[in-house]
């Protein structure tokens, strides 16, 4: 059954107060709840409290037994008066909860995940984000097994109970929706610290982990303090409780969760040291810690009215965490990474059967809408508003938004309205970014007239049709444009912001005394696909001289795409332009290693496929390998030099990270030119590594090669890390990412490995997710890759539908492939849909993918 945005109605009953009592036990947890309910508006509808898999043991209204009924899980109570206290009592089994939604057990801990609709698996409640309540929670548990008892807000009492049990009472002064409820019980130790807010309030900070993991929490703590300071400096947002807790759990469906005052994290986004985590892991931890912390304002203090508004908090918060990471490291490199992710994950979504607007119109299962569109395109929409309004007006708009809506559950429209009111800029047409799906396609051409010293930029936009949406209106597309002298390399037309808001527009530049090059969509000012008509030699020149690092990177990538696509058609293309651009990049004294590492990375096979009418995985692989070989052999000495650079493993500065990034990219290119030399150098890099970045980098090259060096390194890695589950995930992931003809055999064997299991989402995704992202291997012409992934989806679906459903889109892209592969992919989707008892989650994704 689909739910529609247009059907929104305010809640019939409000719940100003929630009191919960938990008698915790892994097998049988008793939950007593006491809700204060108040009729909202003039109506005579019954109280309906959502429940999933709950059997009421008792229901009392105003202290007395009262009639009730269950309507497919929902508790229905008819009431005459306008307010009531409803008490319920139920029993649940956290240990048997494999969906990891609601209250569940993970590695001996008891923990919760409620967003979006997990609270109804804990107790009866309206469980919708526009019902805000004050919570007080009493929890009791066995004192030895669960010495630490945590919930949202402040601890207001604790003590011993009968027969080895103890209790704690928590109260959260801030009204919140049920999806932000959280609770943890377990044998945990804390890395504790303090933070003084801008107004001088002291906040106690704790990161709770198993005792043995304490040494791996320093980076997360540093990141948290940096994020708290940054949100004060950049957004004027101060933390509001005296306590902030983070808990790391091993079994977690997503990255992390922003529960008020008690963030719960997938342990992979908390734990790190140089021996077990890569630089990318360190950066991801900082980004996710900041993201969840920033939600305290953009999410908790101001929350969503309904789940169609999810991007209100997620798009904005992703935008905020991107800004934080940009300020902590290199802004240009961060932008390159974010844009790569957008193109790799969101553009295909926007171009496929599951395309939806940033603010969706309908859903069957809301969990399927935690997408790259809602998160990452949503962040781009916020970024465009800042670009259009300017930083100052944007900040005024965000202040107004927080001020106006503090303590409310609001909509994307409310956000845009605040921006409009604060800036005086009319954003009516801009709102189309929330309602129209599909990546806009922009065509650009620059004409130069030397006699009048003027240039004319012709722009055209087209918004592709998407499922359920045709005939779209032109959008507001902010394009940062500069003109660069072809000969002098100097800026001849200062960077300016052009707002393309018609189907077609012409923009004139005057006083241009030199033939200009067009540098457009600088810093990716708009999330569009751009086709620029250029003259021979223009791109080469831009790749060499564009002063905007992002634009320079883009020019370099365009050169690569051009050669790679040509190589898929007619055999190896002439690599000389790419080789020259890379040589120039490597030799440059002004570019830093991190940027060089990005600029040298060839576009992934998936991204190359996105530029073809029909994806041909074999031709793409051949073409990319041949370009790699050409670069590797022609630039062997420069690459060897970059590969030999060493940065101490405990040096986490941006420059040391850059050196390590470039090192492995250089190794990979070198190995393309000379496999034997590559094997030897990779083995040496592995053996000498004093950090996980170099070690995993060496393995990422070795995994696609053949030889005893490969086997030795993987065996060593396994022996060394088999008891560290986060590192063992890497061992699975690296093998699933191997570009080899036997990868499907290896992956099938790994699915039977004693260390493989499907209850842990990280392990499942390490194997299945990485394999499905390995285009050449996954699209094995036999269809075995599809069958494997479909089998894994069906198997995990019986346990954890959310994890299963997230993998369906990899099969859903069948229309992009030649008929043989397309038919095999479709057949697997058909098989999934025809399987009795599949979840709503998987059903929605698979049936929509079939179209
Ligand atoms: N709000 C969390 C975050 O982005 C993610 C929650 C994911 N929940 C879900 N049902 N997919 O930080
Ligand atoms: Zn979020």
Image: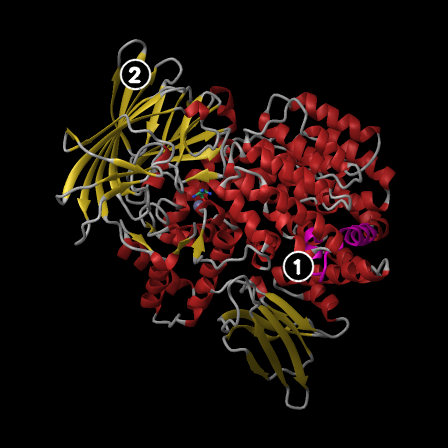
Look at mark 1 in the image and give the residue it sits on.
553
Query: Mark 1 CB in 8 Å range of ligand 2?
Result: no
Main secondary structure along the magenta-highlighted residues: helix
Pointer 1: residues within 10 angstroms few (<14), some, or many (20+)?
Answer: many
Image quadrant in which you'd find residue 772: top right
Q: Which residues are magenta?
A: 603-628
Q: Residue furthest bottom?
A: 451
Q: Residue at x 48, y 53 (%)?
A: 374
Q: Residue at x 63, y 64 (%)?
A: 547
Question: Is 300 in front, or is 242?
Answer: 300
Dot 1 or dot 2: first in sequence order is 2
Q: Residue at x 51, y 25 (%)?
A: 215
Question: Is 82 in front, or is 769?
Answer: 82
Pointer 2: residues within 10 angstroms few (<14), some, or many (20+)?
Answer: many
Image quadrant in which you'd find residue 50: top left
Q: Position of residue 256 (x, y in %)?
A: 46, 38
Mark 1 lies on a secondary structure that is: helix
Q: Is residue 457 above or below residue 237?
A: below
Q: Is residue 167 above or below residue 153?
A: above
Q: Residue furthest left?
A: 81
- Determine if the magenta segment contains residue 366: no
Look at mark 2 in the image and give the residue it sits on.
166
- Determine if the magenta segment contains residue 614: yes
Q: Position of residue 264 (x, y in %)?
A: 42, 34
Q: Is residue 87 above or below residue 774?
A: above
Label 1, label 2: how many angstroms apart (C-alpha)? 59 Å
Q: Is residue 355 above or below residue 261?
A: below
Q: Answer left or right for 133 relative to 6.
A: left
Q: Position of residue 760 (x, y in %)?
A: 55, 29
Mark 1 or 2: the one toward you: 2
Q: Position of residue 421 (x, y in %)?
A: 31, 67
């Amino acid at each position: 059954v689909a739910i529609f945005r247009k059907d929104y109605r305010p809640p019939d009953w409000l719940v100003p107060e929630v009191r919960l009592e938990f008698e915790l036990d892994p097998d049988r947890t008793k939950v007593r709840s006491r809700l204060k309910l108040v009729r909202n508006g003039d109506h005579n509808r019954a109280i309906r409290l959502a429940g999933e898999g709950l059997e009421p043991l008792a229901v009392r209204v105003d202290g007395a037994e009262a009639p009730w009924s269950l309507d497919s899980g929902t508790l229905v109570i008819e009431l005459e008066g306008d307010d009531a206290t409803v008490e319920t009592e139920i029993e649940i089994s956290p240990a048997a909860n494999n969906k990891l939604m609601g209250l569940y057990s993970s590695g001996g801990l008891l923990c919760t995940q409620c967003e979006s609709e997990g609270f109804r698996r804990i107790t009866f409640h309206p469980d919708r984000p526009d019902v805000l309540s004050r919570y007080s929670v009493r929890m009791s548990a066995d004192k030895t097994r669960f010495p630490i008892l945590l919930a949202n807000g402040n601890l207001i009492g604790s003590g011993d109970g009968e027969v080895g049990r103890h209790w704690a009472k928590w109260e959260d002064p801030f009204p919140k929706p049920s999806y932000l409820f959280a609770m943890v019980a377990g044998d945990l130790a804390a890395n504790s610290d303090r933070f003084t807010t801008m107004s001088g309030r002291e906040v106690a900070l704790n990161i709770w982990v198993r005792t043995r993991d304490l040494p791996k929490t320093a980076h997360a703590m540093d990141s948290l303090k940096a994020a708290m300071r940054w949100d004060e400096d950049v957004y004027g947002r101060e933390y509001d409780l005296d306590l902030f807790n983070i808990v790391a759990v091993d079994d977690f469906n997503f990255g992390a969760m922003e529960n008020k005052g008690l963030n719960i994290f997938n342990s992979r986004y908390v734990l790190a040291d140089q021996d077990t985590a890569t630089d990318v892991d360190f950066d991801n931890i900082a980004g996710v810690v900041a993201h969840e912390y920033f939600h305290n304002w953009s999410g908790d203090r101001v929350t969503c009215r309904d789940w169609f508004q999810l991007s209100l908090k997620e798009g904005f918060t992703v935008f905020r965490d991107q800004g934080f990471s940009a300020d902590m490291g290199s802004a240009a490199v961060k932008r390159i990474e974010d844009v790569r992710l957008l193109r790799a994950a969101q553009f295909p979504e926007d171009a496929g059967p599951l395309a939806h607007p940033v603010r969706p119109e309908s859903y069957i299962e809301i969990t399927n809408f935690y997408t790259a569109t809602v998160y990452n395109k949503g962040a781009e929409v916020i970024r465009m508003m800042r670009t259009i309004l300017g930083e100052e007006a944007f900040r005024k708009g965000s202040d107004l938004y927080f001020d106006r809506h503090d303590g409310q559950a609001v909509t994307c429209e409310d956000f845009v309205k605040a921006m409009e009111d604060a800036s005086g800029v009319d954003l009516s047409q801009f709102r189309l970014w929330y309602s129209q799906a599909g990546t806009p396609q922009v065509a650009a051409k620059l004409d130069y007239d030397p006699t009048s010293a003027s240039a004319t930029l012709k722009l055209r936009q087209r918004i592709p049709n998407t499922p359920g949406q045709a005939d779209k209106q032109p959008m507001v597309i902010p394009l940062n444009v500069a003109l660069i002298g072809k000969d002098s390399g100097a800026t001849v037309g200062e960077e300016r912001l052009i707002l393309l808001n018609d189907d077609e527009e012409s923009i004139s530049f005057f006083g241009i005394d030199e033939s200009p090059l067009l540098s457009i969509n600088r810093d990716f000012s708009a999330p569009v696909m751009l086709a620029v008509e250029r003259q021979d030699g223009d791109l080469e020149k831009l790749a060499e001289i564009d002063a905007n690092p992002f634009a320079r990177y883009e020019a370099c990538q365009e050169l690569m795409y051009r050669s790679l696509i040509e190589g898929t058609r007619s055999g190896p293309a002439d690599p000389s332009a790419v080789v020259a651009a890379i040589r120039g990049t490597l030799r440059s004294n002004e570019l830093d290693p991190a940027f060089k590492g990005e600029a040298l990375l060839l576009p992934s096979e998936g991204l190359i496929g996105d530029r073809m009418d029909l994806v041909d995985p074999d031709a793409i692989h051949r073409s990319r390998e041949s370009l790699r070989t050409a670069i590797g052999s022609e630039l062997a000495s420069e690459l060897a030099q970059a590969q030999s650079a060493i940065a101490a493993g405990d040096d986490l500065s941006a420059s040391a990270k850059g050196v390590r990034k470039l090192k492995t990219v250089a190794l990979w290119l070198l190995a393309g030119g000379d496999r034997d030399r590559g094997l030897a150098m990779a083995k040496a890099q592995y053996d000498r590594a004093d950090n996980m970045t170099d070690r995993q980098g060496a393995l990422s090259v070795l995994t696609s090669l053949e030889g005893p060096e490969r086997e030795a390194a993987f065996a060593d890695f396994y022996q060394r890390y088999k008891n560290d589950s986060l590192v063992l995930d890497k061992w699975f992931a690296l093998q699933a990412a191997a570009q080899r003809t036997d990868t499907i055999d290896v992956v099938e064997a790994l699915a039977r490995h004693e260390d493989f299991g499907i209850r842990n989402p990280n392990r499942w995704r390490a194997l299945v997710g990485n394999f499905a992202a390995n285009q050449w291997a996954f699209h094995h012409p036999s269809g075995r890759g599809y069958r494997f992934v479909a089998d894994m989806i069906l198997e995990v679906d019986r346990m954890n539908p959310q994890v299963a459903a997230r993998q369906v889109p990899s099969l859903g892209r069948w229309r992009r492939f030649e008929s043989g592969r397309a038919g095999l992919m479709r057949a697997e989707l058909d098989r999934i849909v025809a399987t009795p008892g599949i979840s709503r989650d998987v059903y929605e994704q698979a049936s929509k993918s079939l179209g």
